[in-house]
Amino acid sequence: MKKFFPINMILVTVILMDLLTGMEFDLFVPSFPELQHQFHLSPFLVEGLLSANFIGYCLSLFFVGSLADYYGRKPIILSGLIIFIFGSMFCLLGISYPLLLAGRFLQGIGIAAPAILSFLIIADAYPLKKQQYFMAMLNGAMNTAVAIAPVIGSYLTLYFHWRGNFSVLLFLGIFVFVMAICFIPVYKLPQHKEALSFRGYVPLFQSKSLVLLMMNIIFMFMPYWVFVGMSPLLYIKSLKVGLAHFGYYQGVLALVFAIGSIVFGLIIHRFEQIKLLRLLNPFYAASLVSIALVTIANSSSPLLITLAFLIFIISQIIPSNLLGPVCLNFIPQAKGKISAVLQGSRLIFSALSLQIAGYFYHGSFREIGIIIAFFIIMGMVTQFFITRNQDIISKLSQVEPT
């Protein structure tokens, strides 16, 4: 790393990229009911604005991963931010649903680069033990902003309508672009670089242990996105939660995760990591039971639904901060590709799940709860095999408690 790049400003820039990534989604979703009314959209078409964003993201990030491993992180991040800025302009000027859909697609293409490469700036410079600490701190900072974003988005929609949200995203994108130019370092690239080809992704899928890790992270990622993606229609349209209060229900989930991540980051290396993972089973069981109960009861209480899902959020604090860096470092020379596959798979599953949820949604939590419960079960199954996989246990054991 070049010494004239202050580490604190690098971290601030990485945090800002993560904030933009999180807010690109959470700042936008409070606008769903207004967009549905203005453009006369069905729930399925409203969720299409998320799916278009996810599709653009997925198409972009598989190229981003290879390009970043070949040309370096900084030029790819800057290119992505430029595309994101243009996509935000499209959305801000959108006078029809197709134009808005195109803008969201461009935003998805552009946000992929900072989304998957921001943490790699840290991963390139620090060993695994330090990466887990920074992962926890960055998760804390990002999710604090994500907690605030729905509240801000709700009030922006209330007072400035849906274009207010896109105006904030545009100016934030420009600001992050300037910060990235000034403070993201250019690392020395490998002398023998792998040729740009999709064949470079093959070794990732040949490692059963890496595939197992990615599957677990993906399955445990899905419940949050399904819940947050459907919550505007459920809370505002069906449960009659006021727009000014909606952000608090959604924001508390990210705030709890943020506080938990920061605390966990400070104590993470005092414990054996494999033992921490094995202690999670009661939390997973409790989260599954809580979701099952409100699903079976088909609860119409926004507070009860939020509290039930909060148990799942708490159960994710430990694995999110432990397993993410381990996954990225499984094949050190392919960090960009691993991050791309991980993020792409998350978004593909998210887009499909949200479209399924939007198709079957009839104004109650039951349809949403069934999908969430399914992914929790799949996450519990893969977590069981992770704690018995010798390759993964070996990686975790490299980080000794202090």
Image: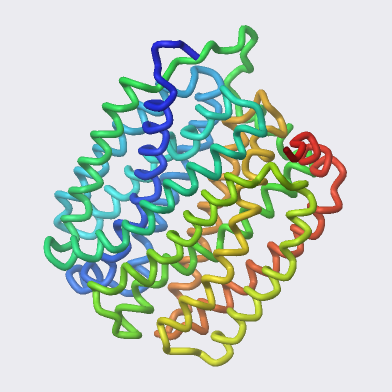
For image coordinates 24% across by 65% down, the residue present is 154
Q: Residue furthest bottom?
A: 297
Q: Is residue 2 above or below residue 297?
A: above
- Seen from the viewer's position, the closer of residues 271 and 294 is 271
For image coordinates 43% across by 60% down, the residue present is 255
Quarter of the image where the C terminus is located:
top right
Estimate the x, y position of residue 317 in percent, counting from the top left.
59, 56
Q: Residue furthest top?
A: 191
For image coordinates 20% across by 68% down, the residue present is 39
Estimate the x, y position of residue 189 in percent, counting from the top left.
55, 12
For image coordinates 54% across by 56% down, the residue present is 260
Estimate the x, y position of residue 307 in percent, counting from the top left.
49, 77
- Seen from the viewer's position, the closer of residues 344 and 388 is 388
- Seen from the viewer's position, the closer of residues 293 and 59 is 293
- Seen from the viewer's position, the closer of residues 214 and 305 is 305
Q: How is the image coloured?
A: rainbow
Q: Quadrant of residue 364?
A: bottom left
Question: Left or right: where does residue 283 sit relative to residue 97?
Answer: right
Q: How many marks?
A: 0
Q: Is residue 120 above or below residue 224?
A: above
Q: Is residue 338 above or below residue 57?
A: above
Estimate the x, y position of residue 299 in percent, counting from the top left.
48, 89
Question: Left or right: where does residue 42 sit relative to residue 117?
Answer: left
